[in-house]
Amino acid sequence: MSSIKILDCTLRDGGYINNWHFGKENIKSIINNLVLSGCEYIECGIIKDCEYNIDKTLFSDFRQLEKFIPKNSKSQFVLLVNYGDVNVEKIDFENKNIIIKVTFKKFQVKEALEYSKILIEKGYKVFINPMNTISYSSDELIDLITVVNKIKPIALSIVDTNGEMTLKDTSRLYSLINKKLNKKIIICFHSHNNLQLSFANAQILMGQNTNRTIIIDSTVLGMGRGAGNLCTELLVKYINDNYNGNYELIPILKIIDEQIKKIFSVSPWGYSAPYCISALMHCHPNYAKYLIDKKGVTIEQIAEILNRIPYEERAIYDINSIEKYAIKFNL
C-alpha cells in the first residue's frame, strides 16, 4: 500500500485568483492552520525576481518565507519557481529544508532539468513539475524520466494543467511513470477541475497497489484559476476515512471561514461550461477566461473560437492567438 501525503498549494496556485495578495496576517494564519491540519507539504508561493511585498506570497528571496514558518513544524515547506524566472546562481539560502518545485513548459524540458540538476548538486530538495504532462508522448516521457532518474529529485509530478485528464489518462500516465521511475522518487499529482474529475483522478492514484509514496496537490475550497483545484477539505476527509489518515479537518474549515470565503465572494471560481469546453479542446483555461471576460459570448461561440486555434497553439496561452481567432465575432 502506498504512503499518501497532501501538498496544499492554496497560497501558490490559489494566488492566481487574488494576485497572491492574501495579507501578512492571513498568510501566517493559513500556514499555521495547514500545519495544525497535518498537511505534510505546504506550498507557500512563488520565488521570482520581483519587488517583495510582505502581504503577497511572491518572494524574491527564500529568507522572506522563513518569518512565516512556525517553529518545530512537522510540515515541509515548498516554493515554486517557473523556469526562466530566476537565475540559478541567485538561488542561495541557508535553509535547505525548503523544497524548490521547478515547473516548466514542454519546450523548456532540457534546460529546466539541467537547472534542477544544479539545484540538487547545491544541496537543495527539488520537485520536478512538467506542465501539461499529458502532452508528452510515451517516448518523450521516458526520455524525461531517464534524466530524472539520473539527477534524483525528491519527486516528479503528473500535472494536469488544462484540467483535461480522464481516469483512463491518469491510469496510463501513472502506469508508465511508475514502471520507469526510480522507486525512491515520489510521484505527485497536480490537477485542475475543468471536467470535475480532479477528485476522481486523485482517487485512482491513491488506490494504486504500490509501496511508492504518492503526494496529492490540493487547495482549500479548491481555490484556483478558472474551474479551480481539488479541495483540501475533501481530500483530508477521504484519506482519513479510506486510508487511516490522521488529518484534522477543523483547521481547514477555519481557513475557509476566516480567509477563503471572503476572497470567493469577490472573485469566485469553480466549474463552468466554458472551462469544460477549454479542457475538452485541450486549451489553456486562460483562453476560456478571455472569452468569458468579454461578456455576451455564447457557449457555442466559445466552442467555435477555441476550435479555430491550431492544436500546437492551444497548450500555452497567447493573447494574440485568441484575439486573432475571435475576430470573426467582433470581440
Image (spheres, rainbow, N blue to C red):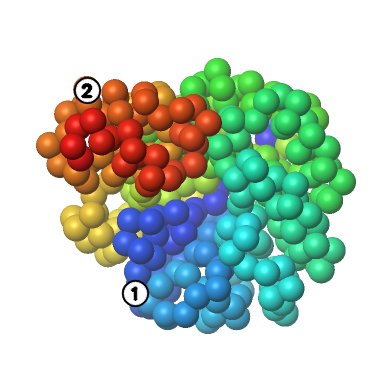
Q: Nearer the viewer, residue 306 or 96?
A: 306
Task: Identify the secondary structure beneath mark 2.
Answer: helix
Task: State the mark number for residue 23.
Answer: 1
Q: In which quarter of the image is the C terminus?
A: top left
- Please name the residue shown 72% across and 32% down the image: 141
Q: Nearer the viewer, residue 14 or 118?
A: 118
In the figure, residue 174 lies in which quadrant?
Answer: top right
Q: Is residue 245 visible?
A: no
The correct choice, above or below, for 26 with respect to 81 in the image is: below
Residue 65 place in picture, x, y as percent: 54, 75
Cβ atoms under marks 1 and 2 closer than 8 Å = no
Which residue is at the far right? 150
Residue type at mark 1?
A: Gly
The correct choice, above or below, for 305 with respect to 95 in the image is: above
Task: State the mark number for residue 138.
Answer: none
- Please name the residue shown 27% across and 35% down the image: 326
Residue 330 place in picture, x, y as percent: 18, 37
Which residue is at the far top? 168
Q: Quadrant of the N terminus?
A: top right
- Residue at image mark 2: 300
